[in-house]
Amino acid sequence: MKHDSDVIIAGGGLNGPALALALAQAGLTVTVVDAAPARARAEDAFDGRAYALAIASQKLLAAVGVWPAVAGHAQKMMEVKASDGRPGEGAAPFFLHFDSRELDQSPVGYMLEDRFLYRAFLDAMQAAPGITLIAETQVVAQAPGPGGIAVTLSDGRVLGARLLVGADGRRSGVAERAGITREGWGYGQTALVAAIDHALPHNGIAHQFFMPTGPLAILPLPGNRSSIVWSETDENARTIAALSDADFLAVLRPRFGDFLGEISLAGPRFSYPLNLTLARAYAAPRVALIGDAAHGVHPIAGQGLNLGLRDVAALAETLVEAGRRGEDIGALDVLERYQGWRRFDSTSLALGMDSVNKLFSNDNPLLRAGRDLGMGIVQALGPLRRGFMRQAAGLGGPQPRLLQGRPL
Ligand SMILES: Cc1cc2nc3c(=O)[nH]c(=O)nc-3n(C[C@H](O)[C@H](O)[C@H](O)COP(=O)(O)OP(=O)(O)OC[C@H]3O[C@@H](n4cnc5c(N)ncnc54)[C@H](O)[C@@H]3O)c2cc1C
């Protein structure tokens, strides 16, 4: 089969571009096909979406060369405080407190707006000689064979490659066409996302308030601004989303509390219905899945993109090493090495976040007592807390080279 490039990536969101850059740096040729127009998310207006990046993710961004373009827009997260709460009661005493000074590395992580990260990826891909970007085009069919995979695009073109990577999000067509089934469930919750301006400085502190109807995360952005991810039951979220900005703030205020002073909306509001979706396999003949295509998780701990970037690092390292040994990078045994590296980690983290959400999203007095005790114990035990912090920072377990900031 003729290969137009070594790898075709379906999906130019965030994980697809990160993988393309890592592979191109190591000398592979890559075609990225994205259904959306290339500039749609690179406009200047703030659209409210921002990511909590673990230190390991920041190291990957540095290793693939995009960190210098976004560093000036990133907000250091110095502390994370988690507490149980009820609307109107104000912030409860902090049950869990992660402080960057307890890790040998500071800060705990970074907050970065989607528009800056997306634009940096786009610019870097356009400048990379080994990457071809095809926007506003969908991957519609795929046919794996012994010599490669034929990929059909919505404009009728058929491209050949050794491997097709599905980075096409939670409803991955690549996975479906490869016969990879999914498991998961809805949370009956919707996340309301917005940027909030406040009178007082946040001092780089992120807050997670566990409310009976769902968690509220307040995450620091540059200046006196924070991003909120406010999970509510679907019904409540529908009602709140339909409110005017002034009424929205009136409902938010008792949950948000007054520790940051007067609050106002800094831009438009967004709603994301929340569900868990896990692919039953990350590899099939000449196909690999990364990011949300492999695992769509609850945003409770802000780990979705971090998990995806761990896939990127592991898949890039697996493919580059296989190529150097003269192996076929689309061969199933090579792809199963990647799957073995990543699937357990993602599934356990996804189910862990699922349990935390279920444990906290209710007002049962027995559960409240139990979880407060559990959090109190973690808080009291320094080594356990530091263990959690290392995991959340992406510093636990065997690390692919890119997550250590090293080239492939
Ligand atoms: C409310 C909310 C808050 C979040 N907060 C955080 C956070 O703080 N930290 C964090 O780490 N993560 C967070 N996440 C998760 C994070 O947004 C996702 O994990 C991440 O965006 C997934 O990126 P992706 O590239 O895998 O998929 P996507 O961003 O979904 O990109 C998929 C791409 O594939 C393209 N596509 C789809 N079908 C096709 C096709 N047939 N052909 C070609 N292209 C196709 C689409 O156009 C799209 O560009 C949050 C998520 C939500 C919902």
Image: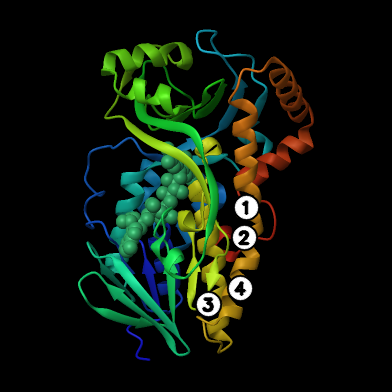
How far is mark 3 from mark 4, CA to CA? 15 Å
How far is mark 2 from mark 4, CA to CA? 10 Å
Q: Which residue is mark 4?
A: 336
How far is mark 4 from mark 1, CA to CA? 16 Å
Left or right: where does residue 290 sit relative to residue 1? right
Q: Residue at x 53, y 83 (%)?
A: 323
- Whether the residue under disc 3 has CB within 8 Å of ligand 1: no
Q: Residue at x 50, y 55 (%)?
A: 308
Is 38 located above or below residue 323 in the figure?
Answer: above
Point out the frontmost of discs 1 and 3: 1
Q: Residue at x 46, y 38 (%)?
A: 274
Q: Amino acid at mark 2?
A: Arg
Residue 63 visible, this orientation: yes
The earlier-in-sequence mark between 2 and 4 is: 4
Q: Amino acid at mark 4?
A: Glu
Q: Which residue is mark 3?
A: 320
